[in-house]
Image (cartoon, helix red, strand yellow):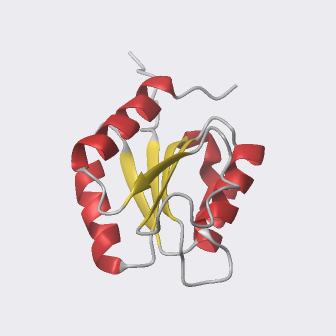
Amino acid sequence: MGQKFEPRRIALIVEDDFEVRGLAAALLEETDLRVVETSSAEEALDYLRERADDVAFLFADVRLSRLMTGLDLARTVRIKWPWVRTVLTSGLAPDEGLSEMPRDVRFMPKPWRALEVLMEAERAAQGYRHN
């Protein structure tokens, strides 16, 4: 009779460039993850405070237009919500300002390859576990 509803796991995109965010969202819509878009790390943190249990994948730009960077966001996520698979992306060279990136956060240079993003999302969907 009553089938238990399991919410779709979420891919949270954090990108302040509208076009790039839309491209990432369109790509991630092809996965089993539900896509949520934010334009700042602050918005993403607000969302995570409410729905972190459902978030499997965080895809964030390093440089964001507000005070908090994607790197700051990744550090916070690793501490508070360690089950969220995190990928940072940037047009910067990986050694420029990213030396303090948490060890288990993946870096993907821009322009990123669609297949790489999809593989990371799939790993997040498959490995999603919240205890």
Report the number of discs.
0
Q: Nearer the viewer, residue 6 or 129?
A: 129
Residue 112 placement (x, y as % from top left):
30, 56
Residue 56 placement (x, y as % from top left):
51, 39
| Vertical comparison of 99 with 67: above or below | above
Q: Is residue 28 left or right of residue 4?
A: left
In the rendered image, the residue lying farthest to the right is: 79
Query: In which quadrant of the rendered image does the N terminus lie?
Result: top left
Residue 115 placement (x, y as % from top left):
24, 42
Quadrant hosting residue 81:
top right
Q: Is residue 21 left or right of residue 36?
A: left
| Vertical comparison of 91 with 56: above or below | below
Residue at 41 percent across and 21 percent down: it is 3
Q: Nearer the viewer, residue 99 or 14?
A: 99
Q: Nearer the viewer, residue 30 or 75?
A: 75
| Vertical comparison of 18 with 81: above or below | below
